[in-house]
Image: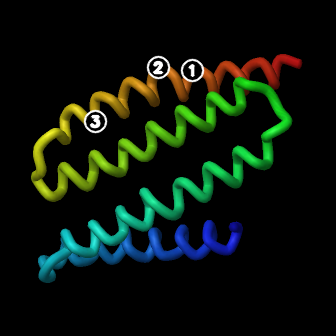
Amino acid sequence: MKRLLYVSGYLSAIGITTTVFMKLNHFGHPGITFLLTSVILIFLFIPSLFLNLYKRDLAKSLSNKLIYSFGFIGFELLVVFALFRLNHWSWSTSIFLTSFVILNFAFFPLLFFKMYRKSAL
Protein backbone atom coordinates (compact mmCIF):
# COMPACT_ATOMS: atom_id res chain seq x y z
CA MET A 1 0.00 0.00 0.00
CA LYS A 2 2.77 2.43 0.87
CA ARG A 3 4.64 1.53 -2.30
CA LEU A 4 1.56 2.51 -4.33
CA LEU A 5 1.37 5.76 -2.37
CA TYR A 6 5.01 6.64 -3.03
CA VAL A 7 5.08 5.60 -6.69
CA SER A 8 1.82 7.38 -7.55
CA GLY A 9 2.97 10.51 -5.70
CA TYR A 10 6.25 10.47 -7.59
CA LEU A 11 4.49 9.99 -10.94
CA SER A 12 2.04 12.79 -10.09
CA ALA A 13 4.84 15.20 -9.26
CA ILE A 14 6.65 14.34 -12.50
CA GLY A 15 3.41 14.70 -14.46
CA ILE A 16 2.56 18.10 -13.00
CA THR A 17 6.02 19.53 -13.62
CA THR A 18 6.06 18.07 -17.15
CA THR A 19 2.64 19.57 -17.89
CA VAL A 20 3.73 23.01 -16.67
CA PHE A 21 6.94 22.77 -18.72
CA MET A 22 5.00 21.74 -21.83
CA LYS A 23 2.41 24.46 -21.35
CA LEU A 24 4.96 27.25 -20.79
CA ASN A 25 7.08 26.23 -23.78
CA HIS A 26 4.07 25.66 -26.04
CA PHE A 27 4.91 22.03 -26.73
CA GLY A 28 2.23 19.86 -28.22
CA HIS A 29 -0.58 18.25 -26.22
CA PRO A 30 0.00 19.25 -22.60
CA GLY A 31 -3.69 18.49 -22.03
CA ILE A 32 -3.11 14.76 -22.50
CA THR A 33 -0.22 14.84 -20.02
CA PHE A 34 -2.38 16.67 -17.51
CA LEU A 35 -5.25 14.23 -18.08
CA LEU A 36 -2.99 11.26 -17.32
CA THR A 37 -1.54 13.03 -14.29
CA SER A 38 -5.04 13.84 -13.03
CA VAL A 39 -6.11 10.22 -13.42
CA ILE A 40 -3.09 9.13 -11.36
CA LEU A 41 -3.88 11.75 -8.71
CA ILE A 42 -7.63 11.07 -8.59
CA PHE A 43 -7.61 7.28 -8.71
CA LEU A 44 -4.26 6.29 -7.18
CA PHE A 45 -2.46 8.89 -5.06
CA ILE A 46 -5.24 10.66 -3.14
CA PRO A 47 -7.23 7.46 -2.37
CA SER A 48 -4.11 5.59 -1.22
CA LEU A 49 -3.11 8.60 0.92
CA PHE A 50 -6.62 8.73 2.39
CA LEU A 51 -6.63 4.99 3.17
CA ASN A 52 -3.16 5.17 4.70
CA LEU A 53 -4.12 8.07 6.97
CA TYR A 54 -7.52 6.58 7.76
CA LYS A 55 -6.08 3.19 8.75
CA ARG A 56 -3.39 4.84 10.85
CA ASP A 57 -5.99 6.77 12.87
CA LEU A 58 -8.71 4.12 12.76
CA ALA A 59 -8.90 3.82 16.53
CA LYS A 60 -8.95 7.57 17.05
CA SER A 61 -11.93 9.87 17.28
CA LEU A 62 -14.73 10.53 14.85
CA SER A 63 -13.37 14.04 14.25
CA ASN A 64 -10.21 12.60 12.66
CA LYS A 65 -12.31 10.47 10.35
CA LEU A 66 -14.44 13.48 9.40
CA ILE A 67 -11.36 15.60 8.75
CA TYR A 68 -9.87 12.95 6.45
CA SER A 69 -13.18 12.39 4.65
CA PHE A 70 -13.86 16.08 4.01
CA GLY A 71 -10.25 16.65 2.96
CA PHE A 72 -10.34 13.69 0.58
CA ILE A 73 -13.58 14.80 -1.08
CA GLY A 74 -12.55 18.46 -1.24
CA PHE A 75 -9.12 17.88 -2.73
CA GLU A 76 -10.45 15.28 -5.19
CA LEU A 77 -12.95 17.85 -6.43
CA LEU A 78 -10.20 20.47 -6.63
CA VAL A 79 -8.14 18.23 -8.94
CA VAL A 80 -11.24 17.49 -11.03
CA PHE A 81 -11.91 21.24 -11.22
CA ALA A 82 -8.38 21.91 -12.49
CA LEU A 83 -8.79 19.18 -15.10
CA PHE A 84 -12.14 20.59 -16.27
CA ARG A 85 -10.90 24.20 -16.28
CA LEU A 86 -7.70 23.55 -18.22
CA ASN A 87 -9.52 21.48 -20.83
CA HIS A 88 -12.34 24.06 -21.09
CA TRP A 89 -15.04 21.53 -20.23
CA SER A 90 -18.37 22.62 -18.79
CA TRP A 91 -19.36 22.36 -15.11
CA SER A 92 -15.95 23.53 -13.87
CA THR A 93 -17.46 26.43 -11.92
CA SER A 94 -19.94 24.16 -10.13
CA ILE A 95 -17.20 21.69 -9.25
CA PHE A 96 -15.02 24.51 -7.90
CA LEU A 97 -17.84 25.94 -5.79
CA THR A 98 -18.57 22.51 -4.33
CA SER A 99 -14.89 22.01 -3.52
CA PHE A 100 -14.68 25.53 -2.09
CA VAL A 101 -17.63 24.94 0.25
CA ILE A 102 -16.37 21.55 1.44
CA LEU A 103 -12.82 22.75 2.07
CA ASN A 104 -13.60 26.16 3.59
CA PHE A 105 -16.65 25.30 5.66
CA ALA A 106 -15.96 21.69 6.68
CA PHE A 107 -12.32 20.62 6.30
CA PHE A 108 -10.36 23.72 7.38
CA PRO A 109 -12.56 24.62 10.39
CA LEU A 110 -12.38 21.05 11.72
CA LEU A 111 -8.64 20.84 11.11
CA PHE A 112 -7.73 24.18 12.68
CA PHE A 113 -10.12 23.75 15.61
CA LYS A 114 -8.50 20.38 16.35
CA MET A 115 -5.02 21.92 16.08
CA TYR A 116 -6.08 24.77 18.37
CA ARG A 117 -7.50 22.38 20.97
CA LYS A 118 -4.35 20.26 20.86
CA SER A 119 -2.08 23.28 21.34
CA ALA A 120 -4.18 24.62 24.21
CA LEU A 121 -3.59 21.47 26.25
Position of residue 45 relative to residue 53, above or below, is below
Q: Image point 52% across, 55% down: which residue?
A: 46
Q: Secondary structure at mark 2?
A: helix
Q: State the residue position of label 3.
A: 96
- In percent of width and height, residue 114 lies at 72, 23
Q: Secondary structure at mark 1?
A: helix
How far apart are the alpha carbons under marks 1 and 2? 6 Å
* The N terminus lies in quadrant: bottom right
Q: Residue furthest right?
A: 121
Residue type highlighted by circle 1: Pro
Q: Residue furthest bottom?
A: 27
Depth check, mark 3 against mark 1: the one in front is: 3
Residue type highlighted by circle 2: Phe
Q: Is residue 7 left or right of residue 118?
A: left
Q: State the residue position of label 1.
A: 109
Q: Image point 12% across, 50% down: which residue?
A: 89
Q: State the residue position of label 2.
A: 105
- In percent of width and height, residue 92 lies at 19, 41
Position of residue 119 relative to residue 28, above or below, is above
Place residue 42 in its image quadrant.
bottom left
Contact between labelled residues 2 and 1, with CB atoms less than 8 Å apart:
yes
- In percent of width and height, residue 22 lies at 22, 77
Q: Nearer the viewer, residue 68 or 15?
A: 68
